Amino acid sequence: AGVGAVARACTGLQLIALRQCRSISDAALATLATHCPSLTSIDVARCGVLTDRGVCLLAAGCPSLTVLHLEGHTEVTDASLKALAQHCPRLTGLNLWVCNSVTDVGVTALAHACPRLEALDVRLCSKVTGRSVQ
């Protein structure tokens, strides 16, 4: 219902903020990826459980993405960052605060593939070290 109905009816949607909507899952991201390819900004910080599956589908389906908030999703790993690097070269802002499963490998992939990146929040990402930001 909810997000799916909006995605199917508003295919030109460019921005959606779903922060702290506990029912948002990988299925919602898949629906957005399928029906809203023009999305440029998505805030799914501290939503329900989101994993690499949903983020990878979102990256592949929304190549114009410039801003993504994934704060608090501990299931998100370097696989998501690599998918964003591969499919979303226009990315300018990425919030990964407390995404404890991402590492220097994913951050480095983003750095090489997303030259427009202006804001990257990796606070409390315990596996990201100074090596990826040197």
Image (cartoon, rainbow, N blue to C red):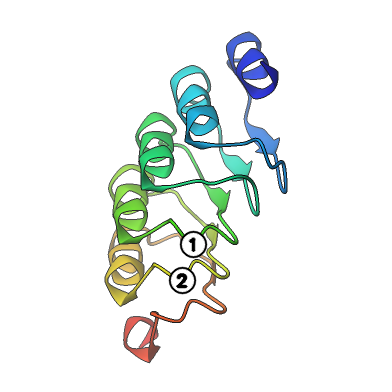
Disc 2 secondary structure class: loop
Q: Residue 6: image x %, image y %?
A: 67, 17
The crowding category of the residue bearing disc 2, from other C-alpha atoms within 10 Å (few below 14, some 14 to 19, many at least 20), is many
Give the label on residue 100, or none: 2
On the image, the x and y values in percent for residue 99 come to: 50, 66
- Given residues 82 and 115, the one toward you in this image is 82
- Dot 1 and dot 2 residues touching (CB under 8 Å): yes
The structure residue drawn at horizontal position 45% and vertical position 59%, both measured from the top left corner, is: 116
Q: Which residue is mark 1?
A: 74
Q: Position of residue 39 (x, y in %)?
A: 55, 32
Image height check: is 100 above or below 47?
below
Viewer-proximal residue among 100 and 117: 100
Amino acid at the residue labelled 2: Asn
What is the quadrant of residue 34 in the picture?
Answer: top left
Q: Residues within 10 Å of mark 1 (few under 14, many from 20)?
A: some
Where does the image place residue 42, in percent across and percent down from the top left? 60, 42
